[in-house]
Image (cartoon, grey):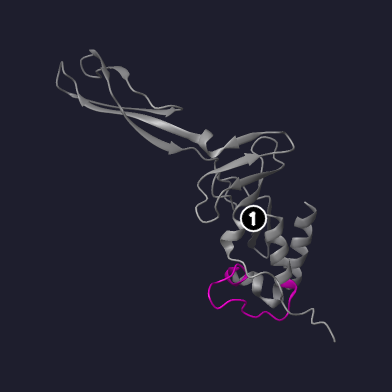
Amino acid sequence: MKRDDARYSGPAKVKQSYMTEFLVECPKCKKDAFVQVNSGYVPSEGKLTCFNCMFSETSKDLIRYKAIVKRNCDNCGKPVNTEIPNQKETSSQVTLPCPHCGVTRTFQPRNEAYKLVYRSSGLSTDPVFNLPLWLQTEVKNNLFWAYNRQHLIDIKTYVEAKLRERQSKGFTTMVEKLPKFIKEAKNREAILKAISQLEKK
């Protein structure tokens, strides 16, 4: 029996199933590093590991607190509005001078948590640290990217196939959500060339 190599036979996976590991650019050595998360559906916490420079960081390391004081001075009655950002721990007390009369008082602030992220480069990034994805390049003025090497392989399998059938009626798969320029037959050779270059990266 003749084998039909033109038919797509990749896995029927949703996009979130690829979002537990991200291959990213290390913020220290600029080489490839890994971001691992517990869930692809709620990727808010994770760990960054670079096996090139051995840099490691967790999303919890990026949590900071802003101590906020909004009171009226008990000496002059005027408002004291102060925010102290970038605190690694919550503050139970802060001592501040009144900006109007100069009298110093100790206040119990409200602590507001927030998370630092790396500055975006305008490229596709991971959802936890905001670091550029390692596997990305431009194809005909479109940004092509993959979360990790398995994601890249499955996209490649889909692009190579000339016959693409719907894999599941119950949910939308990752390949069905790919951008239009990846699915277009006229871009097949350009996409496969880009994937080949990324596989060597």
Q: Nearer the viewer, residue 170 or 22?
A: 170
Residue pictured at 68% horizontal, 65% vertical: 140
Tell me the chief SS of the magenta region: loop
Residue 151 in the magenta stretch? The answer is: no
Q: Is residue 95 left or right of residue 154?
A: left
Please state the extent of the stretch shown in magenta in the rendering. 159-178
Q: Residues within 10 Å of mark 1 (few under 14, many from 20)?
A: many
Viewer-side residue, 170 vs 116: 170
Residue pictured at 67% horizontal, 79% vertical: 164
Q: Is residue 175 magenta?
A: yes
User: Which residue is found at the position 28% from the left and 23% from the top?
Assistant: 108
Task: Name which residue type carries label 1.
Answer: Tyr
Q: Position of residue 169 (x, y in %)?
A: 55, 78
Rendered-image quadrant of the N terminus: bottom right
Question: Is disc 1 placed on a helix, strand or loop?
Answer: loop
Locate residue 190, reporting x and y percent.
74, 68
Q: Is residue 75 left or right of residue 152?
A: left
The residue carrying mark 1 is: 147
Q: Nearer the viewer, residue 142 or 57?
A: 57
Q: Position of residue 113 (x, y in %)?
A: 40, 36
Image quarter of residue 87: top left
